Image (spheres, grey):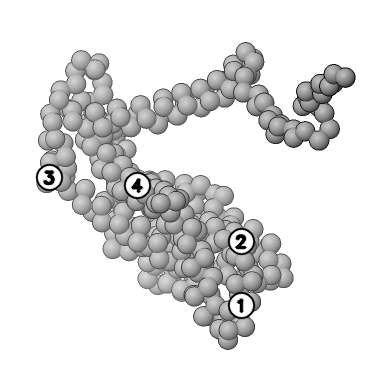
Amino acid sequence: MTATQNPPRTAGTAGAPRPPSRRRRATALAGREKLVLGLMLGIPSLLHIALVWVPALGSVALSFSSWDGIGGFGDIRWVGASNYVDIVTSYPRFWPAVRNNLLWLLFLLVVPTVAGLLLAVLLDRQLRFGRVYQSVLYLPMVLSLALVGFIWQLVYQPEQGLLNNVLGTAATDPVNWLGDPDINLYAVLVAAGWRHTGYIMLLYLAGLKAVDPALKEAAALDGANAWQTFFRVTFPVLKPVNVVVLVVTVIEGLRAFDIVYVINKGRNGLELLSVLVTDNIIGESSRIGWGSALAVVLLVISLGFIVTYLFQVFREEDPA
């Protein structure tokens, strides 16, 4: 009797191990999808290059030239680094503008940041009408700096302004808050800080909402009071928010232009680097090379803070 041969088991036979199923990923895009994707990525990229990188690189190139902007590009005369040397050594408005920009930046880093953090801590305690307070405090941030300048001009007017009338000096000895070069910068800084505080408050409030309540409960069980809980538990957790606040404040301090230009066109004690750039490029002097060199100086100062921020972010995300 011949032995019957068992048929080979197939993959569908019961009891046989089934190889793991692998889903095929659909990576191919149709022609219309490629077109839509190309338009969605290409148009914003081209606009960004045309409106940001081309002017920035053009300013860097023109900063080494002498050109009044009237003739064609053939009238450009290359002068090397003489624009930078002249700006540092013989431009009387440059160093006051640098000093004012640094004071502006220092003020925004200290006063509105501390005030915004304090307001965020208070609003995080679920106060009654907290949403109303939050909206009212954030409202100045919605206004442009030019409009803020107009509003505070009404406050600082010598005879009819709110501040002098409150102080009782409007009729006897009115203080010219915006006309006195010894105090007008600090008066404008108060107006800029009033606007910037609401933005800092919102950033810190968002960070406080993301803090794990278990951390505060653990600190309370360990016997920590409210101050110790905030400075030793809550504030270290807000490190990413602190970095964002730092970068936002640096950008806000260095790009300040509108409010001082509305008040007195950035003169008589309110000189800023952004005002000098505008005066030299589109002003009566039409010194495109000088204005571009000033813009490059402002760009280098801004990149110093931004590159430091990006370096810290990528270093923290590096798994090594």
**Residue 160 % position (x, y):** 48, 62
Label 1 or label 3, whichever lies nearer to me, is 1
Number of numbered discs overlaid on the protein picture: 4
What is the three-letter code of the residue carrying label 3? Ser
Mark 1 crowd level (few <14, some 14–19, many ≥20, 10 Å Cα)? few
Answer above or below: position of 119 versus 314.
Answer: below
- Identify residue type, mark 1: Ala
Q: Residue 22 carries which label?
A: none
Residue placed under numbered mark 3 in the picture = 90
> Distance from label 1 to label 4 (Cα)?
37 Å
- Give the residue at x 35% y 57%: 105
For disc 1, the marked residue is 218
Q: Identify the amino acid type marked 2.
A: Ala
CA–CA distance in space, label 2 to label 1: 16 Å
- Residue furthest to the front: 1
Indicate the amino acid at tag 4.
Val
- Residue linked to disc 2: 210
